[in-house]
Image (cartoon, grey):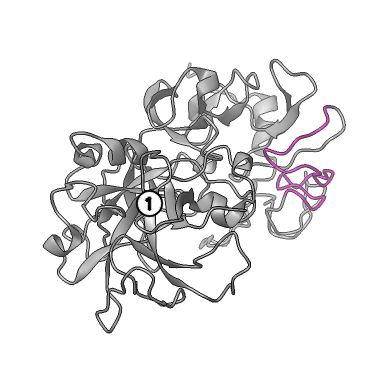
Amino acid sequence: MTRRHMIPSALMALLLLPTCGDDDAGNDAGVDAGPRCGNAVVEEGEECDDGNSDNNDGCCNTCLFCDPCTVSHWATCTPGESICCPSAEDVPTDCAVHSTDPDTARCLRACGDAGDCYWSNECGPTFAGHCWPAYCGQDQGTPVNAPCPVADATGYCYPQGSAADAWGLCVEPGTLPAGSPCERGHYLDEIPRAVQTCNGGICAAWVNDVAPMCMPLCDPVGAYDASPLGAAACPAGFNCLSMSYISTYSRLRTADKGWCVPTPTTDASGLLSCDLLTGGLIADRGQVCDDLVPGTRCGYWRNGSLMGTCQALDATGLGLALGAPCDAEADLPTCAEGLLCSNPDPFGTADATDHHCLQLCDAADPTWVCDATGLVCTSLSVAYYTADATTDASPTRLGLCAPPPE
């Protein structure tokens, strides 16, 4: 006798429940197999059906009534009171309590291992059984801009916060090599695992109107100070460029982040990083900008380090001398190498529109002597953003020779 395979009644009941988000579109046979959640029609087994997949409007995408969520994913919450919103991938989250701080709770997605989490996230132990970014740094015994453990792999501790901080996010290694096109648009700690990620780097565009590509991460301080020089910090065809800057909000210099950006020989829009004080290339101080890209010299990039980029001179080809009046709003550099167009008396009451070519200097070098008498080398982060040097715990080394503050 042939034995028939019977479907348990409990399983049959599950099979008859509405299918989330399926409105039978494209059913060529025209046969409706049963209720379909998402077709804007309340059918058998459904409490509601508003035709959308929004979980936050009172009708969940299971077609059952649910309270609108009150706390977004990652945000702090109150256990037993807050209603957590789904994650960016529409995965339910719950109010998870910090493992060592019972007064801290956040809306997080539950997990069994790192595979259930976003890229560069781990499953506990910070919030037991829940996804949380894989932070690294001094508190975790891992220096920034150095290897770190994440999801049973070795990642790169990418610094965050200000330059005075000592923490970062452990960026998990992916599969895409340097220079590969990649998908941008996610925060570092919210990259879905369905997205292919870069191996030892991040997906970013180094200048405007350039398609994002995988750029390896590097230590800009190490690359600048390296002896021999920092060429080995990046793969062939790339060079390390500091991405630090002085925040107009905190008035502090951001963390010492570095990207291995393509050189012009690798990509037509690539950049050459260089030493603002000497004009030498970061990857080879024996060469200057004009050696590789004729008609260029080392110009100001960002107010965060002594690194600049090779830039074309202004349209007239002028390289204005020390003390010459200049246009700070010009699209191309007007001052000669080693100079910056700026206000000659940042601590005084001079006209803010009055700009001259001033000497750049290394504010961290106590032996530095400015060419003009009566001037001292002052960090740009102190001169233009703080009235008191003690308010900036990590001022930029990039400085100007200017009259000292009174």
Name the residue at the right extreme. 81
Badge 1 crowding class, 10 Å Cα cut-off, few under 14, some 14 to 19, many 20 or more, is many
Q: Is residue 246 magenta?
A: no
Task: Check if residue 68 falls in the magenta segment.
Answer: yes
Q: Position of residue 163 (x, y in %)?
A: 51, 39
Q: Decide if residue 246 is in sight here.
A: no
Residue 403 in the image, given as x and y percentages of width and height: 51, 57
Percent across and percent down for residue 167 are 52, 30
Quarter of the image holding residue 85?
Answer: top right
Relative height, residue 41 to residue 364 (above, below): below
Quick one: which residue is furthest to the front in this view? 373
Q: Which residues are magenta?
A: 55-79
Which secondary structure dominates the residues rendered in magenta?
Answer: loop
The residue under label 1 is 361
Q: Is residue 222 visible?
A: yes
Q: How many marks?
A: 1
Q: In the picture shown, does residue 167 fall above or below 29?
A: above
Q: For the residue marked with disc 1, what is the amino acid?
A: Cys
- Residue shown at 84% from the left, 44% from the top: 67
Callout 1: helix, strand or loop?
Answer: strand
Q: Residue at x 78, y 18 (%)?
A: 102
In the figure, is residue 313 to the left or right of 370?
left
Q: Looking at this view, is 126 or 175 the one in front?
A: 126
In the displayed structure image, the side of residue 375 where residue 110 appears, left or right: right
Give the image location of residue 40, x and y in percent: 74, 60
